[in-house]
Image (cartoon, rainbow, N blue to C red):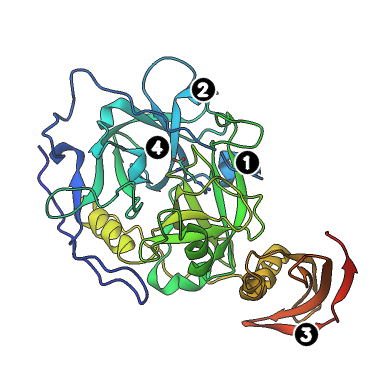
Amino acid sequence: MTVLVASLLFVPAQAGATRTSVEPRAERYSTAIGGESPTPANPVAPLPRAGISVIGGTETPVATVPWQVALVSNGGGSVKDRQFCGGTLVAPTIVITAAHCVLDNGQQTPPGTYQVVSGRSHLNATSQGTSTAVVDSVIWVDELDRPLFEDARQEWDVAVLELASPAAGEPILIAGPAERALWATGRLGRVSGWGVTRSAPYGTNQLMSTEVALLPDLSCRRAYRKFGGFRPATQLCAGRALGGHDTCQGDSGGPLVAYGADGTPRLVGITSYGRGCAGKYSPGVYARVAADPVRSAVADLLETSQGIDAVGDGALPPAQLSGLAARENAWLYLEPDCFEWGPCLAYDVKWCRWTGSGHRCLVTENAYRRRDGRFHCSQQVFVGISGDSIMRQGVTKWQCRRGWL
Ligand code: ARG
């Protein structure tokens, strides 16, 4: 039995966040409630969850995201068919993943029932990379030993795995307190995994990745109001305003990474859940691992139990927004107006151009001007983005035509 090493102080939630009275503490697998023995005689393999891989992504060699690992159940069949979650190396023997990846009915899955595959782009290419046993897993629980992760709320979707030996690949640091600008709203992040894609309903053999925008809490509050709610203290919203690029089932536990000006990667989110995948106005939800209370909980555990500093410092955000980031920002800027129309009809960012001092974007707005829908109208809005400022730079008159769009 491993004795509990860290008793973690709950840091008050940020403004607007849901408060909770629990004091989270780290719970090792070996002290799991129910008194399961650490090496059960008949290990039960974690059930692969049904779901979707990276949507809208492209094939990505693991060398591009060398911190990416796969969680794979032990047993027969191909590695690809046994992969059930992703994870992120934050030290050679430490993986961060999602709590829901290692929980089954509120109980931690015995670590001896799955492996961590690292340094491998194609899961079935068993000659590549390393497959490593997991010796311990840690999730966070309340005073009554109940996991802080619950299906109904999806909070604290974070777990730390300790490996038997160093994994292949390169660890990444969690974005630190002074690196908040790296993952400010409107910045981009990269998500990766072997989960469901449009053409692979059971996930892929080849690692995939895509870029998503870091979205305001409002985007997920709106999307998840009727779907369990969004809790910004422990959850982060990311995706594309108009959908098409997202993580999906099988990607859970994997990284959402933001990049500094010089390309320094930082972990900012853990793939957690979503309403479907890649839908319009339906972004993905990630565990907010780079902000308290989650970051301190993870950092304190790693420092106390392993002497590892897993938190970054000194990375600065890129000075210039990419065209993709500009498009997402133009949309986000107009989003409140769009939703004022009730069901937001369409705000279509046609293009963004770099002007030398900033971006200029053209957005077409479509709406029905009459309740009876006898007219559809459109107007064009120009949006200028430069540095930290974003504003309207002119609107054309509504052009209306009879009939439906
Ligand atoms: N819960 C899923 C998993 O276990 C991840 C879903 C992410 N969904 C999304 N739309 N971003 O793999």
Q: Secondary structure at mark 4?
A: loop
Q: 30 and 282: which one is in front?
A: 282
**Quadrant hosting residue 72:** top left
How many marks do you count on the picture? 4
Q: Residues within 10 Å of mark 4 (few under 14, many from 20)?
A: many
| Amino acid type at mark 4 | Ala
Q: Secondary structure at mark 3?
A: strand
Pick whichever of labels 4 and 3 is earlier in the sequence: 4
| Amino acid type at mark 3 | Gln
Pick whichever of labels 2 and 4 is earlier in the sequence: 2
Q: Which mark is residue 60?
A: 1
Q: Secondary structure at mark 1?
A: loop
Pick whichever of labels 3 and 2 is earlier in the sequence: 2
Q: Nearer the viewer, mark 1 or mark 2?
A: 1
Residue at label 2? 127
Q: Nearer the viewer, mark 4 or mark 1?
A: 1
Residue at label 3? 393
State how far apart marks 4 and 1 are (Cα).
19 Å
State how far apart marks 1 and 2 are (Cα).
18 Å
Image coordinates of residue 335 in percent, x first then y, are 63, 71
Residue at label 4? 167
Q: What is the residue that sits farthest to the front in this orientation? A: 372
| Amino acid type at mark 2 | Ser
**Quadrant hosting residue 197:** top right
State how far apart marks 1 and 3 are (Cα).
38 Å
Q: Residue at x 48, y 68 (%)?
A: 217
